[in-house]
Amino acid sequence: MAEPCGRSFDAALLSGWLDGALTQGDEQRVRIHLEDCDHCRTQVERMRQLREATMSTEFPVPPDDQWSERPRTAGSRLSIGTGWIIVIVWALALAGYGAWELWTSDEALVEKLLVFGGWTGFGLLFVGVLLDRLKAMKTDRYREVQK
């Protein structure tokens, strides 16, 4: 689609030209077009001003303790850790009891296989993701990055 100024290339090339990221052919095509087109020169100048304003803007960096999502006190760490342990033990006991009840019930074998197959599949997926995350945690270069 041609622009009102007659430009035959995408406007993204103007940004690429400003950044110096074009191939030699595209750079030459944009440069020649800018020599004759006030509309595109104005666009490039606006992009340049926006880039300069963005690059020169300073943002306040909050203190490190505001970035952390970890529990801040020993009491909260103990409470959260204990809570997770109780929830995990409860979920495992509930799942085990449900599995035992289903297995020992008079339900058809097909129903048992469908339920246990689904549970087994989800369990294996969970274990696979967990193992990958644990391995990644050991080699993650950005694990200690706070900001």
Image (spheres, rainbow, N blue to C red):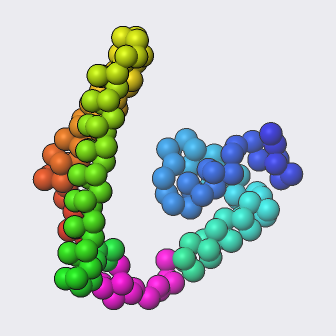
Question: x, y percentage for residue 52?
Answer: 55, 77
Vertical comparison of 62 with 130: above or below: below
Where residue 131 sits: x, y (%)? 19, 41
Residues shaded magenta: 55-67
Q: Position of residue 5 (x, y in %)?
A: 83, 53
Residue 64 seen in the current view: yes
Position of the N terminus by quadrant: top right
Farthest top residue in view: 109
- Return the residue nearer the eye: 139 or 119: 119
40 sits to left or right of 95: right
Answer yes or no: is residue 125 visible.
Answer: no
Q: Is residue 133 above or below residue 145?
A: above
* Relative height, residue 46 to residue 36 (above, below): below
Question: In this rendering, is residue 18 above or below 54?
Answer: above
Measuring 56% from the left and 72% from the top, which residue is drawn there?
Answer: 51
Which of 78 and 94 lies nearest the eye of the viewer? 94
Q: For residue 68, what is the image quadrant?
A: bottom left
Q: Is residue 56 magenta?
A: yes
Residue plotted at (36% across, 11% down):
109
Which residue shows up at 57% across the image and 56% down it?
A: 17
